[in-house]
Image: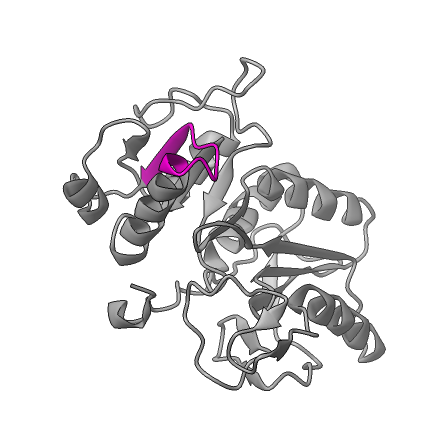
Amino acid sequence: MRFFVMGGGCYGTFYARQLLRARAAGALRVDEIGVVDAAAVPRCLDQLGEAPPLRHYPESWDDFLDRVLAGDVAGSGTPGLPSAAGGAGPPDGDILVTLPFTPHLALAWLLRTLPRRLAGRAWRLEPFAALPATPFRHQADGGPLLLSHADWICPVNCIEPDRCPKIRASRDWDMDRTARELAGSLAAAGQPVDAVELFHCHHVAYGVGGYPLARLPAAAAAIERAAAGAGAVRALVGTISHCHGALNLLASPAGMEREATFAVPPPLPTPNADDRVP
């Protein structure tokens, strides 16, 4: 199994180190830990070295996703990613290791990809006509809708067990359910949602979470099917964990000209390194 850690700084170093520990303990099959970072020598590899299973992909996150998901094994001149079947592209076992509050990775890829897949349609982000009643919610202009079922500060690498370690009681909430219920609320508010595409960062091992890289093309295909007609189409797109999420509403109104422009929200600021689990 291959894990692609997006970023080789503070969080990337933690994730790579934990994956190495899980591999050494026999808790997880790890064939490769790819560190995707444009720096010549990211902190992660400076501290851990670049011996197998560690491998550096010296390119931006967007370039990496575009190259790999386009099946271009030559692309930017970096090593390609042959699939398990010998072809190009990511096999189902490849895991993207990222944070549940980084929706710009999947969202920005969809915004780049959908206009190519659906000629004649353009896409934009819409504000939400309804909001869920979660303990925490916030949306800055043009940014994602940030949600949390916690009204306390959680360790960013919490494995989110069935029994919440903070309240010492059962975790009876789930952001996947919350997002799908929100889609229903939006329909009732006159903003029907045709597809719900969630990138759920599930815990893998040793405090590391991620989702299959293959979820990105699967989401694009689902939105493409929803947009097969001539009318307006909306997709609720979110990167979530059990407790937290960042959601966006991606829309292509009926009759929208292809030349219309959209704005990709900037990446959220990385939390202070002191907030991470040691």
Q: Is residue 30 magenta?
A: yes
Give the residue displayed 49% in from the left and 73% down from the top: 142
- Residue 80, can we see it? yes
Relative vertical location of residue 216 with respect to residue 174 in this rendering, above or below: above
In this picture, residue 16 sits left or right of residue 220: left
- Which coloring applies here? one colour
Where's residue 221, x and y in %? 70, 40
In this picture, residue 132 sits left or right of residue 84: right
In front of the other: 263 or 49: 49
- Furthest toward the top, the residue is 86
Give the residue displayed 76% in from the left and 58% down from the top: 254
Which quadrant holds residue 10?
Answer: bottom left
Relative vertical location of residue 255 with respect to residue 21 in this rendering, above or below: below
Relative vertical location of residue 91 with respect to residue 226 in this rendering, above or below: above
Instruction: Point out the image quarter for the C terminus.
Output: bottom left
In this picture, residue 273 sits left or right of residue 135: left
Where's residue 15, x and y in %? 36, 50
Q: Is residue 100 magenta?
A: no
Which quadrant holds residue 19?
Answer: top left
In front of the other: 124 or 153: 153
Give the residue displayed 46% in from the left and 23% down from the top: 72
In front of the other: 50 or 240: 50
Where's residue 12, x and y in %? 31, 50
Give the residue displayed 77% in from the left and 59% down from the top: 232
In this picture, residue 87 sits left or right of residue 128: left
- Furthest toward the front, the residue is 25
Where's residue 227, x and y in %? 76, 49
Where does the magenta region start and end? 23-35
Numbered marks: total: 0
